[in-house]
Amino acid sequence: GLHTIQVDPIRILDEFQAEQYEKVMENLTASFGHMLDDPYITSNCTLFQQNLGSNGTATMLLLGFSIRYESKFGRPVIHYPYLLQDYVNSNLQEMTLLMQDAFLDNAVRVYEVKIYNLN
């Protein structure tokens, strides 16, 4: 997936912040998922790319991430990445506050998440 966050001052995530981002994204599953945690459904987020860009007026931090959901008892999880996308995109103000509080003090505004290839 791709996540866009407006930042000021301009900087990418350090190692601690990257780990916190992954935890926040994994923990969001509790907001839309069912039968969570071991042994039912688990989530694992990996931040694999960070780039700084601009939308013309503001600096954006572009985060490339993957998130994997697994079910040990055959519960369907193929739609979970889209549920994550819908949840984040429907709660952008709350996501901004959550990320500011958790780890990203320079987040000005959290923009949408886009989920791509599910394989």
Image (cartoon, grey):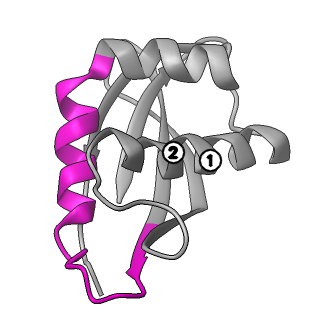
x%, y% of residue 87?
23, 38
x%, y% of residue 97?
48, 11
x%, y% of residue 26?
51, 52
Of residues 24 and 106, which is closer to you in this image? 24
What residue does disc 2 label? 27
Q: Residue at x 59, y 15 (%)?
A: 100
Q: Residue at x 51, y 45 (%)?
A: 27
Of residues 45 and 3, which is closer to you in this image? 45
90 is higher (above) or lower (below) than 37: above
Q: Quadrant of residue 119?
A: bottom left
Q: Is residue 109 visible?
A: no
Q: Which amino acid type corresponds to the residue marked 1 in the rendered image?
A: Lys
Residue range of the region highlighted in magenta in the rendering: 67-92
Disc 1, SS: helix
Of residues 70 and 87, which is closer to you in this image? 70
Q: Residue at x 42, y 87 (%)?
A: 72
Verify CB contact (< 8 Å) between mark 1 and mark 2: yes
Quarter placement of the N terminus: bottom left
13 is higher (above) or lower (below) than 74: above
What residue does disc 1 label? 23
